[in-house]
Amino acid sequence: MSSAAEAPVVQTRRDGDVLVVSINNPPVNALGQAVRAGLLAAIEQADADAAVRAVLIVGEGKAFIAGADIREFGKPAVPPSLPEVCNRLEASNKIVVAAIHGPALGGGLEVAMSAHYRLALPAAKLGLPEVNLGLLPGAGGTQRAPRLMGVQAAAELMLSGKHLSAKAAQAAGLVDKLVEGNDALAAGLAYANELLAQNARPRRTRDIAIATTEETRAAALAELDALAAETAKKSRGLFSPLKIIECARAAVELPFDQGLARERALFTECLNSPQRAGLVHAFFAERETAKIPEAKAAAPRHFAKIAVIGGGTMGAGITVSALDAGLAVTMIERDAESIARGQANVEKVYNGLIAKGRMTEEAKAAIMARYTPSTSYDSIADVDLVIEAVFEDLEVKKAVFKELDRVCKSGAVLATNTSYLDIDAIAAATSRPQDVIGLHFFSPANIMKLLEIVVPAKVAPDVVTTAFELAKKMKKVPVRAGVCDGFIGNRILAVYKQAADYIMEDGASPYEIDEAVRAFGYPMGPFQVTDLAGGDIGWATRKRRAATRDPKARYVEVADRVCENGWFGQKTGRGFYLYPQGARVGQADPEVLAIVDAERARKGVVPRKFTADEIMRRYMAAMVNEGAKVLEEGIALRPLDIDVTFLSGYGFPRWRGGPMKWADMAGLPKVLADIEEFAKEDALFWKPAPLLQKLVAEGKDFDSLNKA
Ligand code: 3HC
Ligand code: NAI
């Protein structure tokens, strides 16, 4: 009995003198065990058959081979290994040709580099992106790439994880021949037969000599030293980049087989590192967030023309994002002056690209032709989707939505970019709450990847799927969130920010806290972020919430004191830090420390010392505990949605996988024990989330909820 599902993932067939080996392992022809075994068997079949003179490797579907099967990492290895397969391919006594028509990444490129000749079609993408997963090319890539493209270029390819186009790959020496079209099989067969007609011989990458003289060897090693110094600075705590350079060094210094052995040892170290686990989690989590309950039920609505209401910081960024996605955008502002400012905000982004030589005036003009400025709501009667980005004020937003309700055509999607406000209340201002949704972009909206898609109670499922479709068009990372104060990200941020304030009042300086957070892997600490965003924004929120704050809750007033001085951060030249003469990097401010001391004294707090570890235990415990509450309330669908929110929107170090993955790796019992210990000082703030207690009691982790 056979069915399509059981069809072998590697099939062979003869075409004249050529054995065609085609890989058919959807969706991306990853090199799982069956594919590795199939490739090995195919090459043995070719070598054993005197009638076969050449082997052609092609991938079915969109990809050539996207690499090792990432799902197998961390599980027991099952032979044959990929290095073994690659070595066997390269050793073949028949000529081996790879015809690449799509992604040839990681192990996929390693297979291609083990072939004797490489052909690429225009849609080919070649790269060694293992570094993005905390790894290094582990099937000979670190030894073969330097032989084909030179040591420095290979090291740079492996360190950047970049994909090369077919043309760039040929220029770099990775590809022998380019052919137009998309028929890899026909092009590959023609090339293989052409090679046979020329009596071409097997040509093994391993035999290419690199750095043969003392001078070239010394020069290559010096280049690697320079790259290592630069990488140590840039890669901030990442493990695999420096190991990649060690492998490249081995390619220069050692014979091929010893280089391979070195690569294997270092690959195994990377594979076993917690960073690999964090980065692989991030890879899959980012692909899971689009899998939402509404996806099966409702196809997205059509949209091509959109409107953005408000041309301030966010409105302009959203407009750029939409224009870049090929949409037509009408921007609405209050008056002529504001719309002129809104348009200038948009043009500033493109002018910046022109100044850097990354865009031409003509390209800008073509984009701006899809942009229409207006001060009249009546001009958006025919748009398919609206994104509101006016002031963060419920009454102002309700008035805008009333206008939208009046002018927009039936079925138009009406979205708000509010950061905190109640979207159910905004929807209730219209006669069509089924069309109202939250689209929470992050600043700068044309750059930041995260898009929280906030789903109010009455919204129709096809509006939710439309929002996900928009995210895809804009190349954003979408996360589905429920309505609450701050949704997923800002709600959790508010809590760990509070923890940071408590730590400050209890004894650590804001500078020590920022340093500990940076050492953990964040690009900036919380007080630096406040200074960058503007302290006045948080101050306004705190004032708004003052009336509803639990009087029993501890409230730290240091930030209010700082703001009362007009110290709002970078834009005012000082905040928690000093920014003399517009400096971007702040300096510690003794006057801020004096405010902190005065506040401690006023509250009778005797300051104590905190190590960086003690700071981070509290910071992370606050984040994870609130994350568990967000899950319990259904604000986030799965722990991975929280992880992706923090990875894409809040600078959480990607190699730690996100806060919930971090908690799993730290061990939930340990995190809960910390919370219980801190609760002895402040039971209200450190109230353990029941979900966290339940998981610990059942011996489970957050990841078990991702799979449920
Ligand atoms: N292993 C297992 N699954 C993979 C995979 C891989 N290498 N690459 C992609 N997938 C899966 C995705 O998880 C997704 O699954 P889903 O549909 O169930 O969510 C599906 O394939 C499609 O992937 P994308 O949504 O990313 O599709 P795109 O068309 O946008 O992108 C791609 C295709 C460019 C191939 C992209 O998936 C990609 O970059 N993949 C990873 C490539 C990579 O990192 N390769 C190196 C692996 S490590 C290695 O090879 C080690 C070796 O040196 C020993
Ligand atoms: P902003 O003050 O820079 O811009 C608001 C714009 O809206 C102004 O240009 C104003 O003229 C215009 N506007 C006000 N009322 C209007 C009306 N009735 N019709 C048309 N235009 C009107 O504010 P910003 O920062 O762009 O914020 C906008 C929204 O985005 C707010 O809801 C905010 O909470 C949210 N947001 C802001 C982020 C940020 O970092 N700035 C991040 C994510 C969301």
Image (spheres, grey):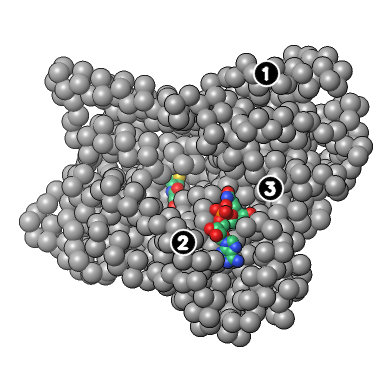
Instruction: Classify residue 404 by image quadrant.
Output: bottom right
Decide if residue 326 is in sight here. Answer: yes
- The kind of residue on which mark 3 rests is Asn
Quick check: 438 left or right of 689? Answer: left
Q: Label 2 belongs to which residue?
A: 337
Residue located 30% across and 61% down the image = 364
> Mark 3 or 1 closer to N-term?
3
Residue of label 1: 593
Residue at 69% across, 33% down: 564
Name the quarter showing ligand 2. Answer: bottom right
Distance from disc 2 to disc 3, alpha carbons, whole Å, reads 32 Å
Residue tagged 3: 490
Of residues 436 and 476, the one nearer the viewer is: 436
In three-dimensional space, the C-alpha distance between marks 3 and 1, rounded to whole angstroms, equals 27 Å
Disc on the earlier residue, 1 or 2: 2
* Residue 152 as seen in the image, left or right of residue 443: left
From the top left corner, tell me how far across and down residue 359 is, in percent. Answer: 28, 54
Q: Nearer the viewer, residue 239 or 512?
A: 512
Residue 589 image point, x, y percent = 60, 19
